[in-house]
Amino acid sequence: MAFTKHHALAASLLVSQIAGQSGFATSDRSDDAFSFVQPAEWPILGPYGNSPEVLPSPNTTGHGGWEDAFQRAQAFVDQLTVEEKALMVTGAEGPCVGNIQPIERLGFNGLCLQDGPLSIRYADYASVFSAGVSAACTWDRDILHERGMAMGKEFKGKGAHVALAPVCGALGRSGYAGRNWEGFSPDQYLTGIATAQTIMGFQDAGVQATAKHYIGNEQETQRNPTFAKNGSLTAKDQEAISSNIDDRTMHEAYLWPFANAVKANVASVMCSYQRLNGSYACQNTKAQNGLLKGELGFQGYIMSDWGAVHSGVASMEGGLDMNMPGGLGSYGFTFKDAGSYFGGNVSAAIRNGSIPESRVDDMIHRIMTPYYLFGQDKENYPLVDPSSVPLNTNFGPRSQWDRQDWSAMVGGESSRDVRSNHSALIRKHANAATVLLKNANNALPLKAPRSIAIFGNDAGNPTEGFYNQDNYEFGNLVVGGGSGTGRLTYLDTPLDALKRKAYEDGALLQQWLNNTLIAESDVTDLWIAPEPEVCIVMLKTWAEEADDRESLGFDWNGEAVVNSVAKACGNTVVVTHSAGINLYPFADHPNVTAIIAAHYPGTESGQSMIDTLYGINNPSGKLPYTVAYDGDDYNAPPVTSVGNNTGQYAWQVYFEEGLEIDYRHFDAKNIDVRYEFGFGLSYSTFELSDLSIEPVQTDITSEPEDLPIAPGGNPALWETLYNVSATVTNTGDRDGAQVAQLYVAFPDSAPEGTPVQQLRGFEKPYLCAGESKQVSFEIMRRDLSYWDVVSQQWLIPEGEFKFSVGFSSRDFRVDGAATVVDA
Ligand code: NOJ
């Protein structure tokens, strides 16, 4: 586990922390804006920052389609004692990574919460799917849904009620952030759609999805406080870092995909570890009560990240509905053992009037409504697979937590195989995610080479097992580390797959897996035969939870490995397995003929590489981020200020670049890039024609109609205002898919800081050679609006919008314009 850094927490805890720290975000502002004033000198924000207070926490009504389930939740809550109410909102040590205890008296079997975004982690005989970053590379709604649903079936088969997935925060503000790969893309539009599709997939399979981490968890550095060495988990030497985000950036960037999640009826949202505009995210009233439950009309429950709770009553009033895993500190303690801000304090707080019972009832209504909605109360809902239990390392030795009777929750056949035909899906998803970055002289697809060499420590089998939580030297890298990892039941490595292919073709295959040897050798001395027809170099880049990346380079001296091979081999093909952004300094080397970015593809890594190298797959993946020429070209470092580095509130990150992250930054500053956002080659060629931009509504106003809030926010924001369409033609001689991407440039009347252009639509048709298809993009009101901090409203600016459709953010083939609102 990567969590050892946070394990060193002492056990002497305060049990009766009823009110916790006040934790209310205070403000002297009279309006409702979510903004800190950004003085020139960037002062260190104090404990409560400038985030305005929004109270009380709105009650769920189940509206938007959950009404019947809500009624059942109400009937359930009506039967609970005050002590049972406390249990329902407080995690307990148990068989899953998060547990709500059964109440057998009421036929409630408890809730099993399991990680994570690419696999059910505490399970055997489960699949490891592609990571979020790979899924984003597909730009394919159907695949995103299919992947979510296949995972959902596996979670359900293993008895999990709640999947701690998907990730849409980190959004990817900084390329260095350690968890970007768990999520999708720094583009909020792409991430919004990927998030919604994944949620619908999970929930169509009957499992509750969790959109995480809410919000501003854009860095791992100091994500948790540094606790005082005196053994108390309530005394801190330094608070967690504060992500300081202005109101407009919050709405248009970081909140955007969460709006998609709520619109997709996500059951749960996980609040994040760090502080937000000065107050801890899990007790930030503006973020939770104001934005999520108020503005977005979220009807589900907010659960805390593990150990992200820093107060009792303040968090409950601040909108937190479930404390996970239950105890104080990051890991390993329950309220039974060591005290909790929730637990027994909830019942005490109800009794002494510190918290209205109605608030706690609302918390449980929110928790139980999705449970009934997805039929998780039914007798045929699978129990937790007994084989998962000993795999749960979250709570330390089982003897510590085995006092509770979990028999109502655990049972059925042990080691159930839930993988079904998913290896075929994983291969399909990996193929659709493969991004071809360079293909000089049509080096690919390979034309049945008779002599092949493969280089690099990413090619072969991991030598340290299949559940890695550290950057291991030898072995193919297909998932990162931390809670978002998966437990491989097998791995088809590039070397395995290439061996099969070479055997089939009668080819000569040579292999070198030691990067140091390759980097330091004259590669011609290594060859046992004349220069191979193709040299495949496998590179990797590790990333994990709780650590930000230190560089955008390849691990294990990867660049030197490429240079050494390319010096000798005229046909060097580089294949990368990576957490995300890398620099490709060797991309212009004339002997580097092709580059493939496969990111983290899951178990079918090897076969999917062969599929693309040999043309069984025509690559159609597109970069969900920008590859710069130089690391310094990126803005947005994970941390912008540590003050004097010792002060309690020293850790700060000011999102001062506003909306200008990733391509929005490169466009605004007019910086050349090596591979732009949305870029990816095909073995075929494509054209676009016949752009049409048609309004769907007449008399479009700048302000949206003020409709009653529904899940996702004001429904008027989701209304289609324009239909844009274009024709895509496969002009080459190979069948394949292509992503048509629509970018919108706002008129000049939009406020300063509006990005030069923004992705607002994509479609991925599959086209036989010579075939044409029309693609259409539904442009919603939100797509054409900016968040006006003064009127606290989404407004469409006056003037002409430009619509450009192309095959990347810098490769437009057709464009047109339209004036949306009359002056
Ligand atoms: C902490 C991680 O931030 C979160 O994503 C995960 O779900 C929990 N731990 C449980 O493992």
Image (cartoon, rainbow, N blue to C red):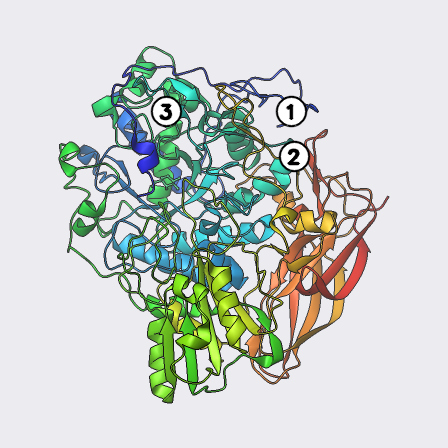
Q: x, y percentage for residue 599?
A: 47, 60
Residue type (three-letter) at the residue carrying disc 2: Glu
- The answer to whether the residue labelled 1 contacts the one labelled 2, judged by CB atoms less than 8 Å apart, is yes
Q: Quadrant of ligand 1?
A: top left
**In this figure, which residue is indicated by the disc labeled 1?**
42
Give the CA separation, mark 1 to mark 2.
10 Å
Farthest top residue in view: 352
Of badges 3 and 1, the one in the foreground is 1
Instruction: Look at the numbered disc 3 and give the secondary structure of its residue.
Output: helix
Where is the C terminus found, in terms of image quarters? top right
Q: Would you say residue 599 is visible in this rendering?
A: no
**In this figure, which residue is indicated by the disc labeled 2?**
656
Mark 1 CB lies closer than 8 A to ligand 1? no
Of pointers 3 and 1, the one earlier in the residue sequence: 1
Of residues 715 and 801, which is closer to you in this image? 801
Where is the N terminus found, in terms of image quarters? top left
Residue type (three-letter) at the residue carrying disc 1: Trp
Residue type (three-letter) at the residue carrying disc 3: Val
Compared with 457, 720 (above or below) is above
Q: Does 817 sit left or right of 291 as displayed?
A: right
Of residues 424 and 31, which is closer to you in this image? 424
Of pointers 1 and 2, the one earlier in the residue sequence: 1
Q: x, y percentage for residue 751?
A: 77, 38
Crowd band around label 3 with a 10 angstrom C-alpha radius: few (<14), some (14–19), many (20+): many
Give the tally of numbered discs. 3
**In this figure, which residue is indicated by the disc labeled 3?**
360
Crowd band around label 2 with a 10 angstrom C-alpha radius: few (<14), some (14–19), many (20+): some
